[in-house]
Image: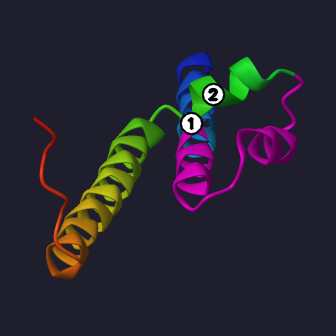
Amino acid sequence: MKLAEAVAELKHMDDLRHSFASRALALGESLSMIGKLLGHNKIDTTARYAHLARDSTKASSARVADSIGADILDEGERDDTAAPARPART
């Protein structure tokens, strides 16, 4: 195997490791578990491999925010049917 072919093969393997880590994180695996699966000693190394998870993090954050917003709106609707508010003190 020539040097160029060997470098290309190593790059391919590295790409697979990045894809594995990102997919595992998107599926809910913890960084520490992914690090163990990849044989990493440091969580920082695993975090670099899981770089594609940023979009998943944003999507997850949006889902949580939407859920909170829906609860707030539901709470407001329940308040409208609750007992009348007390008049403001003057």
Q: Residue at x 54, y 38 (%)?
A: 12
**Is residue 4 depicted above or below 58 in this figure?**
above
Q: Residue at x 61, y 17 (%)?
A: 3
**Is residue 85 depicted above or below 54 in this figure?**
below
- The type of residue carrying mark 2 is Ala
Give percent across and percent down for residue 22: 54, 45
Horizontal side of 78 relative to 67 (left or right) equals left
- The type of residue carrying mark 1 is Ala
Give percent across and percent down for residue 21: 62, 45
Please state which of residues 62 and 30 is positioned toward the viewer in this rendering.
62
Over which residues does the magenta segment extend? Answer: 18-41
Please state which of residues 19 and 34 is positioned toward the viewer in this rendering.
34
Q: Are marks 2 and 1 in contact (CB under 8 Å)?
A: yes
Find residue 47 and name its label: 2
Q: Residue at x 10, y 35 (%)?
A: 90
The furthest residue to the bottom: 81
Say if the magenta span includes residue 28: yes
Give percent across and percent down for residue 81: 17, 82
Q: Which residue is mark 1?
A: 50
**Is residue 13 depicted above or below 30 in this figure?**
above
Please state which of residues 32 and 45 is positioned toward the viewer in this rendering.
32
Q: Residue at x 12, y 54 (%)?
A: 87
Q: Is residue 40 visible?
A: yes
Instruction: Please rate how many residues cluster around mark 1, counting C-alpha atoms within 10 Å: few if below 14, some from 14 to 19, many from 20.
Output: many
- Under tag 2, what secondary structure? helix
